[in-house]
Amino acid sequence: MNQHLSDRITHMQESATLKMAKISRELKAQGQDIIDLSIGEPDFDTPQHIKDAAKKAIDDGYTHYTPVPGYPELRKAIAVKLKRDNNLDYTPEQIVVSTGAKQSIANVVLSLINAGDEVLLPAPYWVSYSAIADLAEGKSIEVHASIENDFKVTPAQLEALMTSKTKLIIFSSPCNPTGSVYSYEELQALAQMLAKHPNVYVICDEIYEFINYTGKPNASLAQFPEVKDQVITVNGFSKGFAMTGWRLGYIAAPLWIAQACDKMQGQITSGTCSIAQMAGVAAATGTLQPTYDMVVQFRKRRDLVYKLLNEIPGIKTNLPEGAFYFFFDVSAFFGKKYGDYTINCPEDMSGYLLREGKIGLVNGEAFGDKNCIRLSYAASEDKLTKVCSRLKDALAKLS
C-alpha cells in the first residue's frame, strides 16, 4: 500500500539517531551485547524537586486542556529565566511552549518558509533541521565547517551563500552533533553581518545551554539589539534538566512569529501536557544545583573519552566545549576493508562498528558531514571505556 502514501512522507528521511537506537534495541532484544551511544539523552534522572512539582500538579487538578501557547505561569517563569540566564528581554506573549524543542523548531519553520525559500544550515547540523525544512518545501543549503575550525562557520561563509531566496538560518550552540560553542565575539560578528540582511531570520537552538564547559555563560544571538527582531531562540528542559520524556520546549521570538506558531500549534497538538508544564515551572524557577552536578560528570566523561579517542590510530578529533557528543573524523579508514566489508563512507563505518564492534554510533552524513561519526558520552564511565576499547579493536581489523 506504500503507493498510496504522500510524496511528503515517502521523501522524508527517517531520523538517523532514532533509526540507530531502534536497530540497537532490536539487536539487544535478540541477545546481542550492544552498547548504544547513538541517542542524545542524559542518563540522569529528573531532579526530585521537579518530580515533586509534577506530583503536586496532579493533586492540584492540573489535568485539563492547557492554553495553546502554554500556561501563563510557565511563560512568565521562562521570561524570568531568559533574563536571568541569557540577558534576553521577552514578554510572556512572545513565548510559545511546545511538546519538545523539535516541535518548536517545526512550528517556526512551517510558519516562515514558503516553497523554494532557502534555509542555510551550518554543517554539521542536527539531523531534523533539514528534514523539517524539506517538509516546509524549503531548500536546504549546507554551509560546511571543518574539524580544524571546531566545526564553526564564519559570517563570511554564510553571507557568501545568501541569495534573494534566503529566508532562514538554523544552528545550535552548544552544537549537536559537534559540541561546538559559539563565543560572544563570534556571535557579535554574526549579528553585524545579519543586520545587513533584515529579511533573513535565524533560529538559534540553545537546548544544550547549561552543558557548557567554557567557564562562561552561554551566549545568545538575540542579545544583540541590531538583530533581535530577526532571531528566534529555541530552548527546552530535556537536556539541562534531564527531562527528555517530559517533552517540553519553547521559543522566544518577535510577537508576530510567536502568534504564528500559536496558530500553527493550535491545529496540530494544541497545548502541551499540563503536568509537564507545571514541572517546567519548578525547573525554571528552582535550584540549578542538580544541573551543575550533572555537568561536572559530563565534563569528566568528555575528558575521559577525549583521552581514549586520541589513543586510537587513525581517528581525528577536537575537544568539544559543550553538549555531550564527540564528532570524530574516520576518513583515514575509507577504502579499507575487513573480510568482504569495505568502508567507503560514515554510513559504512557505523554499520561496520555495529556488526563487528557491537556499538551503536550515528553516521555523520545524517548531520551533513561526509567524514565523521557521532558518539554520545551520556553514559557511565565504564560503558564509555568499553565502547572506546571495542572501537579501537574494530578499527584495528581494517586494512
Image (cartoon, rainbow, N blue to C red):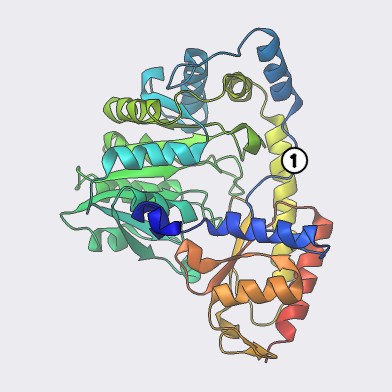
Can residue 311 be seen in the rendering of this structure? no
Q: Residue at x 60, y 50 (%)?
A: 323
Q: Residue at x 64, y 82 (%)?
A: 314
Mark 1 burial class by Cα count in 10 Å: few <14, some 14-19, many 20+? some
Depth check, front residue: 195 or 399 = 399
Q: Residue at x 56, y 24 (%)?
A: 273
Say left or right for 267 vs 86.
left
Residue at the extreme left of the image, as rendered: 164
* Amino acid type shown at disc 1: Phe
Where residue 233 sits in the image (x, y, percent)?
41, 37
Depth check, front residue: 352 or 233 = 352
Placement of the C terminus among the 4 image quadrants = bottom right
| Vertical relation: 253 (above or below) 202 | above
State the residue position of label 1.
44
Depth check, front residue: 4 or 49 = 4
Q: How many marks?
A: 1
Task: Identify the element where label 1 is drawn.
Answer: loop
Say left or right for 33 vs 160.
right
Where residue 129 sits in the image (x, y, percent)?
42, 51
Where residue 72 sits in the image (x, y, percent)?
47, 14
Which quadrant of the view contains residue 154? bottom left
Where residue 383 sits in the image (x, y, percent)?
80, 59
